[in-house]
Image: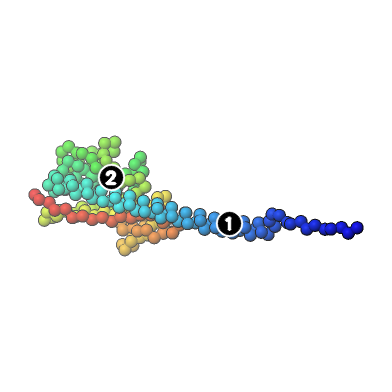
Amino acid sequence: MKLLSRKKSDSGFTIIELLVATAVFSLVLIVFLSAIIRISELFYKGVNMSNTQEAARNIVQDISDDIQFYQQQPVIGANYFCVGAHRYTYSLYTKVDRATSHGITREVINGGCPSPSTQPVNYSKGEELVDTGMQLNKLTLSNCANGLCTISIHLIYYGADPSVLVPGPSGVTPAVQAPDATCGGPASSSEFCAVADYQSTVLQNF
């Protein structure tokens, strides 16, 4: 009797095919995740830059509005100045957390322009103008000669890593204490760095 052999068709995948498929899938997944991470970094970079620029613009606008409204010469002291009924007290090179450190505080003062050492800042009633995580590295107000007041500000944001900052043209180091610090540190943390320079000249009509 002649036995007939039947061929059985193989089903499933071999180990090599599975390994190849897994490698291809892993490569696609890595590329996809890298793209997602990069997009999120760009998003947060844009948000931080926008917030820092808006904060700097609002500070200059508040000071400008007071100068124009009160039509008085600002009284300028060491790390504070007064315009009309408002006193602005500021701290340079101090990262703001609002609980223990502040950038610039605007508060109502009744009469004169006492220094913070004479009349301490009332942080519970004053308005903090710098957001958490930001740092004021420069704030200048001219003596308003000839009816023109020039306000300049340099505000930075660097999250938890100051190495994302580099010194500006002034060459002051460390960069976190430079009045013109700029972004330029590790690219991996670039989304946590933002700087804003803002300047405005206000015309007074005494």
* Residue lying farthest to the front in this orientation: 1
Picture residue at 33% right of the left edge, 61% below the top: 168
Picture residue at 38% right of the left edge, 57% below the top: 165
Please rate how many residues cluster around mark 2, counting C-alpha atoms within 10 Å: few if below 14, some from 14 to 19, many from 20: some
How far is disc 1 from disc 2 in space, using C-alphas? 50 Å
| Residue 193 image point, x, y percent | 38, 54
Picture residue at 63% right of the left edge, 60% below the top: 20
Please tell me which residue lies in front, 170 or 46.
46
Rendered position, 112 above or below 138? above
Residue that mark 2 sits on: 129
Closer to the N terminus: mark 1 or mark 2?
Answer: 1
Residue that mark 1 sits on: 25
Rendered position, 107 above or below 2? above
| Residue 4 image point, x, y percent | 84, 58
Q: Secondary structure at mark 2?
A: loop
Amino acid carrying mark 2 in the image: Leu
Is 87 left, or right, of 42 in this rendering? left
Q: Visible in this render: residue 143?
A: no
Is 25 left, or right, of 206 in this rendering? right
